[in-house]
């Protein structure tokens, strides 16, 4: 019997019709994508051939009965980030322009645009959600260039196709150059200062690579502890320079010209569509609305945080000189190391003290338990759901009444086939239709946490616990989705609103009432001591101003590129140094460059949008203050947060949703108070 491509079956024979990862082969993707394109074209032709007058129901709300292309591309591009290989990378390069051309063909179809336009101009009574979808659909055509003449449409096609390939190449270069560096140590003296957890992880990495000694990489669980604890300053310098020269060296992974081309193509596209710059194009559909409003927030943050940040840095420099002599010059590779020493002096607390209390299995119970406390939902592992890697676990998420809400995949540990960082994504969005009822989502959490060693389970830092909570907040946004249209469900919201649910959850990381629900010593089972909890709370704002200014510097760099009104022709490193100079606390280190590895703004969807993290931080501090007033586990407040924000996706303007929850608009005051600035 001839094997059938698993993607060709709409209703997978798996629990909750989850992706059949165990059946999918590399050769399945390309034909499924091409068949999906063919089906898409036929479906759209059916809409265009409808003899009835255009209406919301027969033009905008109509959906494909079998969206094959959506199903196959979600799996492929999610795995391209979480479980890739050279063959998948090559296929992505091949299919990317084909998929871009298909998207262009839809948005540039004049008959389709005229039908949508007719509905937009004369649509009658619609619900708020229908109004939002119609506005999004019409605006999508306009922003894609449907109203342009043929010459400019053709140029836009070329721009979109080239951008798709360039952003993909940027990401691939970033991952490959990150993987290319290894610090191999065979002299144990060079490990001085490093905690057992780092040594054991490095020993395991060396063993897996078939080497003696210890192996350190530029991936977060290896790099961060090394820069914090390693006594050997020269090795810290080597690690810092390796990390900060990713994709700037004169080799095949250099992203300099790719950055230049991405920035200039985005500018050209924006100006073709009638905007002054790419930032104006982006911010039209954001809560911030304008470059002026973003700059106003950046100015407020610089004014409030810059002087405290300078004081924080001076205190660390003073400690370093006290220990090393008055001629010692603090460099970027010294900051985490001496910052840790100062934190120990003041609070007698560091990440390693907390690790034994943050065994991953218990942290997971705590985070899941927090969702149960707030919303009544529960998580049940289902080993029958196929997964794409042995590290991945699949859960069924059940509502308080036992009804099925979602599938949740968790993928916690780094590997060479996975991009760095942490993210939430989905393999299936939520929607409601007559045929499918309330079709529930399949959500995935992907992270790069400290791995178990041969002698210890996976033990996390407090920072990793915060990361878990952050991504879990995104997951809840997807899990609770309850909208009619998939295009508006879950995290399909304005980009500067999407971080509210995630950053909101981070607040719980330093709440003793939450930590006491799960933080137990992995060996003794003893709860985290009260005096240690007290020190966590006392130290929560250590170097908070420095961290804020660092984020502001990234925002300024992003805005500098995307407010350009003329093509970028200058020296990339010089431009970077000027762009973020007013938020820099160290002099630039020659040869280093952030831009060429800044995936968020070059290939990750945050171009002219990195400010979203600080924007959402204002929102999350304001929102959490409501919980603090009512009680951090207050079910009524949590239910309002779920009903007004988490379940509503992008069905209404985010400020409307936020006001409905909060009873008013947010201010920066709660953030300043939380950070001890005000």
Image (spheres, helix red, strand yellow):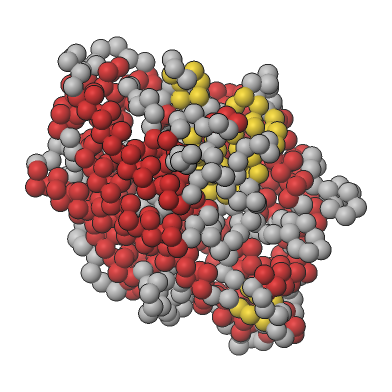
Residue 60 versus residue 552 in the image, above or below: above
As drawn, 9 above or below 670: above
Q: Is residue 198 toward the left or the right of residue 618 in the image?
A: right
Residue at 37 percent of width and 48 percent of height = 30
Residue 326 lies, in percent from the top left, at 64, 86
Q: Is any atom of residue 365 visible in this view?
A: yes
Image coords of residue 661 (percent x, y) = 53, 26
Residue visible at 18% across and 38% down in the picture: 108
In the current view of this chain or complex, which residue is farthest to the front? 1
Residue 488 image point, x, y percent:
41, 29
Image quadrant where residue 107 sits: top left
Q: Say left or right for 39 vs 623.
A: left
In the image, taking residue 63 as reference, residue 145 lies left or right, namely left
Q: Is residue 192 shown above or below 488?
A: below
Residue at figure coordinates x 64%, y 56% from the top left: 413
Q: Nearer the viewer, residue 467 or 455?
A: 455
Residue 230 shows up from this direction: no
Total tally of numbered discs in the picture: 0
In the rendered image, residue 276, in percent from the top left (x then y), is placed at 20, 50
Residue at (32%, 52%) from the top-left corner? 96
In this orientation, which residue lies closer to the viewer: 420 or 600? Answer: 420
610 to the left or right of 229 = left
């Amino acid at each position: 019997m001839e094997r059938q491509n698993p993607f060709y079956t709409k209703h997978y024979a798996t629990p909750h019709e989850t992706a059949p990862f165990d059946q999918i082969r590399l050769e399945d993707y390309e034909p499924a994508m091409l068949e999906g394109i063919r089906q898409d074209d036929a479906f759209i032709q059916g809409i265009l051939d409808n003899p009835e007058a255009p209406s919301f129901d027969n033009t905008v709300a109509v959906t494909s009965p079998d969206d094959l292309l959506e199903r196959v591309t979600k799996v492929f591009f999610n795995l391209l980030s979480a479980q890739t290989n050279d063959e998948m990378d090559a296929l992505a390069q091949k299919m990317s322009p084909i998929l871009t051309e298909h998207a262009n063909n839809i948005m540039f179809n004049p008959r389709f645009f005229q039908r949508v336009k007719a509905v937009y101009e004369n649509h009658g009574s619609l619900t708020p959600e229908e109004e939002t979808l119609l506005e999004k659909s019409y605006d999508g055509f306009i922003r894609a260039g449907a109203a342009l003449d043929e010459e400019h449409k053709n140029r836009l096609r070329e721009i979109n196709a080239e951008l798709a390939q360039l952003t993909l190449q940027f990401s691939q270069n970033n991952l490959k150059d990150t993987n290319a560096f290894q610090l191999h140590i065979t002299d144990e003296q060079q490990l001085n200062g490093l905690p057992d957890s780092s040594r054991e992880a490095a020993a395991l990495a060396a063993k897996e690579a078939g080497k003696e000694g210890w192996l350190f990489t530029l991936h977060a669980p290896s790099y961060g502890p090394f820069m914090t604890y390693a006594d050997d300053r020269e090795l810290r310098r080597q690690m810092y320079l390796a990390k900060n020269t990713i994709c700037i060296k004169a080799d095949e992974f250099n992203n300099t010209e790719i950055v230049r081309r991405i920035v200039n193509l985005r500018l050209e596209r924006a100006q073709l569509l009638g905007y002054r710059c790419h930032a104006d194009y982006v911010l039209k559909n954001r809560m911030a609305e304008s470059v002026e409003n973003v700059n106003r927030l950046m100015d407020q943050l610089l004014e409030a945080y810059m002087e405290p940040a300078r004081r924080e840095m001076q205190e660390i420099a003073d400690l370093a000189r006290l220990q090393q002599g008055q001629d010692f010059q603090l460099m970027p590779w010294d900051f985490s190391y001496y910052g840790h020493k100062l934190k120990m002096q003041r609070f007698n607390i560091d990440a390693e003290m907390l690790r034994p209390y943050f065994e991953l299995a218990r942290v997971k119970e705590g985070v899941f338990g927090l969702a149960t406390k707030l919303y009544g939902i529960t998580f049940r592992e289902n080993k029958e759901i196929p997964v794409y890697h042995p590290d991945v676990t699949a859960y069924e998420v059940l509502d308080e009444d036992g009804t099925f809400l979602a599938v949740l995949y968790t993928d916690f540990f780094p590997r060479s086939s996975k991009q760095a960082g942490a993210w939430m994504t989905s393999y299936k969005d939520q929607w409601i239709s007559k045929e499918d009822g309330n079709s529930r989502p399949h959500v995935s959490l992907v992270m790069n946490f400290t791995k178990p060693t041969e002698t210890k389970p996976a033990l996390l830092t407090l920072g990793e616990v915060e990361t878990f909570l952050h991504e879990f907040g995104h997951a809840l946004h997807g899990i609770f989705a309850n909208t009619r249209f998939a295009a508006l469900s879950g995290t399909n919201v304005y980009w500067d609103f999407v971080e509210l649910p995630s950053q909101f959850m981070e607040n719980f990381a330093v709440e003793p009432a939450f930590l006491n629900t799960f933080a137990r010593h992995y060996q003794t089972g003893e709860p985290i001591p009260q005096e240690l909890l007290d020190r966590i709370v006392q130290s929560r704002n250590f170097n908070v101003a420095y961290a804020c200014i660092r984020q502001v510097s990234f925002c300024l760099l992003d805005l500098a590129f995307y407010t350009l009104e003329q093509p970028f022709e200058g020296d990339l490193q010089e431009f970077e140094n000027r762009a973020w100079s007013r938020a820099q606390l160290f002099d630039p280190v020659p040869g280093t460059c952030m831009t060429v590895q800044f995936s968020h703004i070059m290939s990750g969807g945050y171009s002219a949008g990195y400010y979203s993290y600080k924007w959402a931080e204002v929102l999350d501090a304001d929102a959490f203050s409501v919980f603090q007033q009512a009680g951090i586990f207050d079910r009524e407040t949590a239910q309002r947060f779920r009903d007004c924000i988490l379940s509503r996706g992008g069905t209404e303007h985010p400020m409307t949703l936020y006001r409905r929850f909060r009873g008013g608009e947010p201010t920066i005051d709660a953030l300043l108070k939380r950070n001890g600035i005000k």
